[in-house]
Amino acid sequence: MRPKKLLMILSAFIFNEVAAANQVLESDSLDTKQQSIVSISAFTAKGDLSGLKQALNEGLKAGLTVNEVKEELIHLSAYCGFPRSLNGINTFNTVLTERKSKGITDPEGGQPSKVAETDKYQTGKKVLESLTGKPETGPKTGYAAFVPAIDTLLKVHLFNDIFTRGVLDHKQRELTTISALTVLGGVESQLAGHLGICLNLGFTKEELEHVLAFIEFKIGKKEADSGRQVLSKVLASRN
């Protein structure tokens, strides 16, 4: 192939990639803070600390407060594990130290709420019911019946201790969740459940599609396409 023709092909490819990236970034489906939440969650779940560092800087620039980012990284401990969460927290500490050395002072933001210390299970149960829009009645089934302890941990730790901390609202927490689960892969059932919750909380089909487009832009097409398959099934079941 002649060098001139090869150069034309490469130029066209680069132009298309840049155009696609701009389309994702300029979409009005998600604002810049929401895009940053997706990006921080995705890179944390992926374990890509270099990409996370950039995402954290972009998030602070987009208007996320220090405590909002901290809450997102705490929230992720329940979905991609303490090792990924702790690596994210340490990376964020490094980012803040570097920014302070440059004279940048980032707003702390609101403080976490005091979580319920009594009837934790019932409080968590009510939070979960508000997310799914479905009351939990009747005997336990599935994993909850097979291993009751995990049902207790989910209600007490995740939906009480974490979801009631405030700083991030439930929509922001679910945005964090679906971004992490999409990147993790192999958790289609859980992703489907949380995409359903997102729809219950008011996210539109277009907004969820933008989440996946943004993940494709930041992480990769494979992860995004897997998420699209799950979203397609969720939407079809609701129709």
Image (cartoon, grey):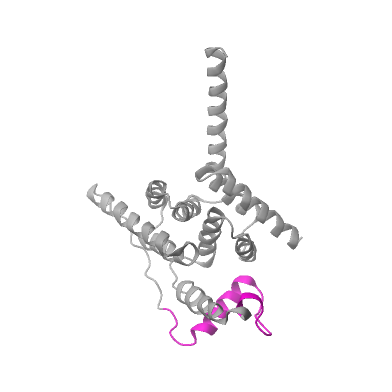
Toward the right, the furthest residue is 239
Image vertical order of residue 210 relative to residue 14, above or below: below
- Residue placed at 40% from the left, 48% from the top? 58
Q: Position of residue 64 (x, y in %)?
A: 41, 56
Q: Which quadrant of the figure contains the C terminus?
A: bottom right
Q: Position of residue 54 (x, y in %)?
A: 39, 46
- Residue placed at 59% from the left, 57% from the top? 186
Image vertical order of residue 67 relative to residue 223, above or below: below
Query: Is residue 14 or residue 80 the one in the foreground?
Result: 80
Q: Is residue 49 left or right of residue 233?
A: left
Q: Judge whether residue 29 can be spotted in this image.
A: no
Q: Report which quarter residue 187 is drawn in.
A: bottom right
Image vertical order of residue 4 relative to residue 215, above or below: above
Q: Is residue 180 left or right of residue 74?
A: right
Total number of numbered labels?
0
Q: Is residue 236 left or right of residue 209?
A: right
> Per the image, is 178 magenta?
no
Q: Position of residue 213 (x, y in %)?
A: 58, 46
Q: Report which quarter residue 127 is drawn in.
A: bottom right
- Residue placed at 45% from the left, 65% from the top? 75
Q: Which quadrant of the figure contains the N terminus?
A: top right
Q: Judge whether residue 117 can be spotted in this image.
A: yes
Toward the bottom, the furthest residue is 118
* Magenta extent: 115-144
Query: Is residue 71 or residue 63 the one in the foreground?
Result: 71
> Per the image, is 132 magenta?
yes
